Amino acid sequence: MNYWLFKSEPDEYSIDDLASEPDQIGRWDGIRNYQARNFLRDQVAAGDSVLFYHSACKVPAVVGTAEVVKAAYPDPAQFDPESAYFDPKASPENPRWFCVDLRWGSKFAHPVALATIKADPLLQDMVLVKQGRLSMQPVAAAEWEHLLKLGQKS
DNA sequence: GCCAACGTTGGC
DNA sequence: GCCAACGTTGGC
């Protein structure tokens, strides 16, 4: 069982959007970065735990948790010429981009802001701190535990 | 909306 | 196979 951090722009798809889905299960898609693609395709498994992070917004923060309910499968948007995520170089025989399905888990009472994470000595090794622009990334078990505590306490 | 970090692409 | 150009991401 692995831990991950998934980023999403709340204007596009927020933790509340995920919570509002039927059965609270939604597709996490639109990844067009190869590092993230490789993690998603090769390492993310059903049952893995996910920190849900809001990016490209006023206060970037970890805002809750989710669980992977379906491992990587080809992102349908890459085959759709009407989609903003269309990729002419991808084909159903040779998909280039992948997505997973998530089930909403929890919403933090207190979102943990990026600034807080950067200032926390226990979280200095997070990929989030060391490498800014990566839309999904592995999280260590100790980091997961610590972030959950921060999110729940007042 | 600027631009830095990272990865891929493609001309030579 | 070098490396400049380009695309994506995302904090500021």
Image (tube, coloured by chain):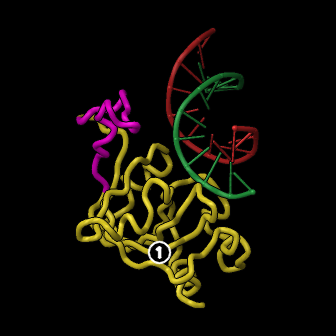
Chain colours: A yellow, B red, C green
Residues shaded magenta? A72-92
Q: Is residue A81 left or right of residue A144?
A: left
Whether A82 is among the magenta residues is: yes
Q: Which residue is mark 1?
A: A64
- Tag 1 subunit: A
Give coordinates of residue A138: x percent, y percent.
50, 65
Front residue of this view, candidates A52 and A15: A15
Whether A77 is among the magenta residues is: yes
Front residue of this view, candidates A19 and A130: A19
Give coordinates of residue A115: x percent, y percent.
70, 70
Q: Is residue A127 above or below residue A98?
A: below
Q: Residue at x 31, y 70 (%)?
A: A103
Main secondary structure found in the magenta portion: loop
Residue A142 visible to an observer of this rendering: no
Crowding near the residue tagged with mark 1, few <14, some 14–19, many ≥20 C-alpha atoms within 10 Å: many
Q: Quadrant of residue A80?
A: top left
